[in-house]
Amino acid sequence: MPLRLHRFNVWHPSAFSRLTSKNADGCKNDYPATISLAPHSVAHGKSCPKHSNSPLKISFADRLRTYHVSMATRLEVRGLTVKLPTRAGWIRPVNDVSFSLGEGETLGIVGESGSGKTMLALALMGLDPPGARRRGQAWLQPRSRGGEGQNLITAAPAEMRALRGREIAMIFQEPMTALNPMMRVGAQIEEAIRVHESGLSGSQVRERARQALERAAIPEPESRARQYPHQLSGGLRQRVMIAMALAANPGVLIADEPTTALDVTVQKQILELLANLRRELQLSMLFVTHDLGVVAQVADRVAVMYAGRIVEEGAASEVLRHPRHPYTEGLLRAAPQLTREKLTPIAGTVPALDALPPGCAFAPRCVHHVAECDAAVPDLRRPSGADENHHARCILVR
């Protein structure tokens, strides 16, 4: 697949802090980080009457600078579907998913547990469960091979082993289960390097592993390399996972809930580390999370998943300020706020994949439900007046 350039809006927020910039005279301007947002009605684009007195507060810079940039497409996914066999028949945890990821860009994948986020990441890595069937396209533009792209869906196992770690890598959700408890962490990083750098000597591999730990901001990397996973704190184990994922210098990094089960201070450190590494290494990052606050801090664009499908996508600033799908609205209302206000949960639960309702999968939980919602699965539509890359899968979007 030839190298493509795409054009979209990119938002660079500085969440949970103050945004500092310089004007034309070189003077610094400080912008407050917290703003109040009223959720918009999907049907009419107005503030929801039920929540008009309770504006949504999201901590990110209130002066959003949106500008156009052109960048190479590092990963382009088109119509990706994953089917898994069950006793009740075949289910589709990932259903007709399409998106693109530019060089140096972060795309946030958001949704409740069971929405298909992790299965999407595993399918791209070629690590889907035994018996799974994949179809569609996922074109990866390697850094090491000119303009020759590789379709991850049709790649042979040997080709995927060569790509995995070198061109596309993944930070798994739980470091304690992802790391081998019987191996020192340094040896595990060295193993990831040897797979792709077989010509290096033992001392060179050890030095590369030490550099990887150092780049992940791990103090005393030589001594930490000799420790086992259970001897490290949760934050250090997550840093080891980051060091291992980036040891072979991939161009695309998939981060699957990298801050889960970490306290707020360590979470902030991990997010800052990933942001610094992204800028330093020009990484393209697919950031999987259920935390909208994290999305506001790290993502340029966001895709909201529900029951295996993307139901809303667009620039992070646009989606978080003007959600157009009822599910996205519900997620924002259920998010904790700085003020002491009662949270509004989304009624019901994510439906079982072997018993999806007809039409829109969110219809049984939707406060805007009408009979037409049950007729067919809606297409992604661009709301009127919205950014050209903002789309929502709802029949009420006009």
Image: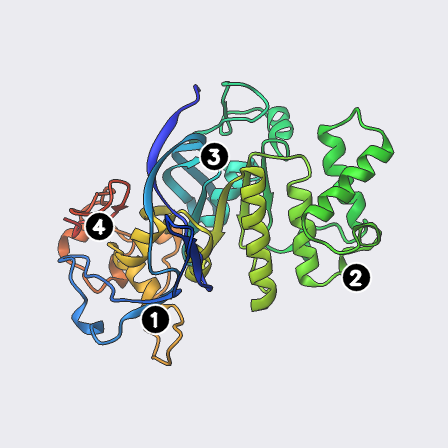
Residue that carries the numbered disc 1 in the rendered image = 345
Separation (CA) of disc 1 from disc 3: 36 Å
Q: Residues within 10 Å of mark 4 (few under 14, many from 20)?
A: many
| Residue 121 pos. (x, y %) | 51, 43
Q: Residue at x 80, y 44 (%)?
A: 187
Separation (CA) of disc 3 from disc 2: 36 Å
Foreground: disc 1 or disc 2: 2
Q: Residues within 10 Å of mark 1 (few under 14, many from 20)?
A: few
Q: Is residue 180 left or right of residue 315?
A: right
Q: Which mark is residue 394?
A: 4
The residue furthest front is 25
- Sequence order check: which comes first, mark 4 or mark 2? 2
Give the amino acid at mark 4: Cys
Compare residues 246 and 34 and report the one nearer the observer.
34
Q: Which mark is residue 103?
A: 3
Give the amino acid at mark 1: Pro
Separation (CA) of disc 3 from disc 4: 30 Å
